[in-house]
């Protein structure tokens, strides 16, 4: 057997081993793992959507840009509430803002700025 044939056999063996390893890693996951991963993805999706939708709405209502919420509340399955403390309350800005997003509605379900309810959607 020549050196070229030996190299081709080694390369073929590496490919076969790679396919076997990929096939074995695709085994079915337990239901508990699938459910836990789905809950985490849902929570991340809700927080991402709230972080994208709430700050522009607060800026539209108050003229003040918000970045990072001071508090995040929620049940990690159905809703998330982001809260901000205003930095320019003495210059006409807001004191506090609260924005709630329900997963079933897919958008802002409640927006409260300085105890004034601006958006309130029924579930």
Image (tube, rainbow, N blue to C red):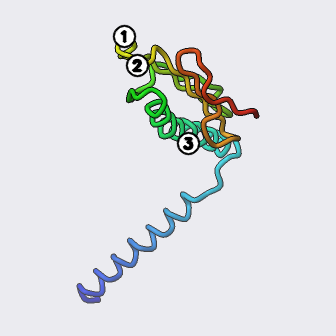
Outermost residue on the front side: it is 92
Indicate the secondary structure of the residue bearing disc 1.
helix
Which class describes the residues within 10 Å of circle 3: few (<14), some (14-19), or many (20+)?
Answer: few
- What distance separates the C-alpha of mark 2 from that of mark 1? 7 Å
In the image, 14 versus 70, the foreground residue is 70
On residue 45, the disc is: 3
Q: Tell me the residue at 70%/41% (across/down).
A: 104
Image vertical order of residue 87 relative to residue 10, above or below:
above
Q: Tell me the residue at 25%/86% (across/down).
A: 4
Which class describes the residues within 10 Å of circle 1: few (<14), some (14-19), or many (20+)?
Answer: few
On residue 90, the disc is: 1
On residue 78, the disc is: none
Q: Tell me the residue at 41%/17% (across/down).
A: 86
In the image, 63 versus 76, the foreground residue is 63
Q: Position of residue 16 (x, y in %)?
A: 45, 73
- Mark 2 and mark 1 in contact? Answer it, CB < 8 Å: yes
Quarter holding residue 25: bottom right
Indicate the secondary structure of the residue bearing disc 2.
loop
- What distance separates the C-alpha of mark 3 from that of mark 2? 29 Å
Assign the C terminus to one quadrant of the image: top right
Q: Would you name the residue on which mark 2 appears? A: 93
In the image, 82 versus 5, the foreground residue is 82
Left or right, residue 86 beside residue 82: left
- What distance separates the C-alpha of mark 3 from that of mark 1? 35 Å
Outermost residue on the left side: it is 3
- Mark 3 and mark 2 in contact? Answer it, CB < 8 Å: no
Which class describes the residues within 10 Å of circle 2: few (<14), some (14-19), or many (20+)?
Answer: some
Left or right, residue 9 beside residue 28: left
In the image, 87 versus 2, the foreground residue is 87
């Amino acid at each position: 057997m020549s050196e070229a044939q030996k190299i081709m056999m080694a390369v073929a063996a590496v490919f076969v081993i790679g396919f076997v390893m990929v096939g074995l890693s695709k085994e079915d996951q337990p239901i508990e793992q699938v459910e836990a991963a789905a809950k985490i993805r849902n929570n991340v999706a809700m927080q991402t959507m709230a972080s994208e939708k709430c700050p522009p709405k607060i800026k539209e209502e108050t003229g003040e840009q918000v970045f990072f919420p001071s508090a995040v509340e929620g049940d990690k399955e159905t809703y998330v509430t982001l809260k901000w403390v205003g930095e320019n309350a003495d210059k006409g800005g807001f004191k506090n803002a609260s924005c709630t997003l329900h997963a079933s509605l897919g958008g802002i379900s409640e927006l409260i700025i300085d105890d004034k309810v601006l958006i309130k959607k029924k579930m």
